[in-house]
């Protein structure tokens, strides 16, 4: 194993995520610290990008909030990312969905992938 | 001062418990062998010579072989002296990453990547001449005037011009030891470190 891979393995630890990719609809539960209090907030949207490897990997979630597109980048192994829930698997043809930024309304919808066998994590 | 010789492995990033992400460089440091102990009495100054990296037996000269034989070790690739070392080590003993602790402020010395022959904009941070448009000619990255006219009639010494860039020995101060993997001899320091991957760096405190 390469040295970088070894360090990544040590740093990333035992964090489990559902298998998702660009086009999927996910809910990210992340920690927010307000003063001394800590609470969980969720961000629901479509994954438009996954990037990086090992400890530096991150993904971008895009949602339309009050008619305005909002994107957030979440590092996979940040201690503030509590959990990721996979809501829907999308049918898309590319790995980076930046074209979504130019779209709104009906054309911004992502078709849901219907599996022959229901294997998608609910 | 205490120090160790290492090899730059690559970069990654690490999170602290609050979620702050820090970029850091992985360095494979040591184990180094103490191959010579210089003292004020015998050499005029105090220093510890450390050696690092395997060298093929057949590539070593006779002088090297005998020098390393004194420390009862195989020939090493790199040797470096650390002046006035605070480590109490005898010849033949090894120095590992254990000399540092997580959270230490260290200095890292390395040789920057060679850039070749570069112009003044890249080499010295000049801003170039003029604008792109408004009838300007093709002098965007030119150095401009080199100095005065008749009073001097020469270019001052030290005028910054184009030339070989990079490949300099650079010392970075105040880098933090973020993490240590003692069993693998890896040490993670905050931020970037001069040089290409695989280059030799010195970590000292």
Image: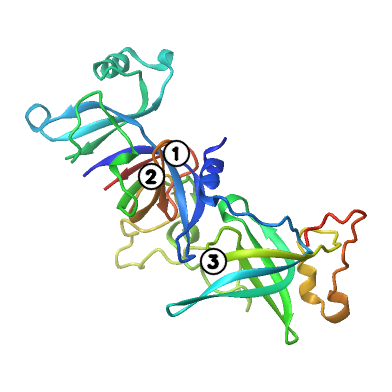
Query: Which residue is drawn at the image coordinates 88% and 62% (left, top)?
Result: A113
Drawn side of residue B136 relative to residue B121, left or right: right
Give residue B110's mark: 2
Drawn side of residue A34 relative to residue A68, left or right: left
Q: Are marks 2 and 3 in contact (CB under 8 Å)?
A: no
What is the x, y in percent for residue B45?
12, 35
Closer to us: mark 1 or mark 3?
Answer: 3
Q: Which residue is mark 1?
A: B199
Give residue A80's mark: 3
Drawn side of residue B124 relative to residue B97, left or right: right
Q: Chain of mark 2?
A: B
Quarter of the image for residue A40 reads bottom right
Closer to us: mark 2 or mark 3?
Answer: 3
Q: Are marks 1 and 2 in contact (CB under 8 Å)?
A: yes
Can you say which quadrant of the picture contains the C terminus of chain A?
bottom right
How many marks the image carries: the answer is: 3
Query: Which residue is drawn at the image coordinates 35% and 19% (left, top)?
Result: B75
Q: Chain of mark 1?
A: B
């Amino acid at each position: 194993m390469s040295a970088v891979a070894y360090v990544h393995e040590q740093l990333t630890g035992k964090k489990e995520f559902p298998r998702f990719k660009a086009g999927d609809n996910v809910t990210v539960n992340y920690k927010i610290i307000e003063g001394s209090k800590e609470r969980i907030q969720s961000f629901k949207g479509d994954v438009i990008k996954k990037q990086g490897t090992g400890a530096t990997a991150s993904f971008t979630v895009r949602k339309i909030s009050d008619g305005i597109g909002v994107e957030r980048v979440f590092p996979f192994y940040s201690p503030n990312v509590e959990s990721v829930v996979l809501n829907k698997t999308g049918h898309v043809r590319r790995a980076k969905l930046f074209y979504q930024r130019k779209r709104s309304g009906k054309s911004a919808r992502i078709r849901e992938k219907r599996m022959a066998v229901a294997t998608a994590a609910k | 001062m205490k120090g160790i010789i290492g090899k730059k492995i690559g970069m990654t990033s690490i999170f602290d418990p609050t979620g702050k992400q820090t970029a850091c460089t992985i360095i494979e440091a040591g184990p180094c062998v103490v191959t010579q102990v210089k003292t004020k009495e015998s050499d005029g100054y105090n220093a510890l010579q450390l050696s690092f990296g395997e060298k093929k037996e057949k590539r070593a000269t006779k002088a090297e072989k005998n020098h390393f034989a004194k420390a009862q070790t195989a020939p090493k690739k790199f040797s470096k002296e650390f002046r006035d070392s605070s480590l109490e080590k005898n010849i033949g003993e090894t120095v590992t990453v254990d000399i540092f602790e997580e959270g230490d402020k260290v200095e890292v010395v390395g040789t920057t990547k060679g850039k070749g022959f570069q112009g003044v904009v890249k080499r010295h941070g000049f801003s170039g001449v003029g604008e792109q448009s408004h009838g300007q000619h093709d002098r965007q990255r030119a150095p401009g005037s080199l100095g005065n006219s008749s009073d001097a009639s020469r270019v001052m010494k030290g005028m910054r011009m184009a030339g070989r860039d990079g490949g300099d020995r650079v010392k970075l101060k105040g880098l933090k030891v973020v993490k240590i993997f003692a069993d693998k001899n890896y040490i993670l320091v905050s931020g970037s470190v001069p040089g290409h991957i695989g280059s030799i760096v010195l970590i000292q405190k």
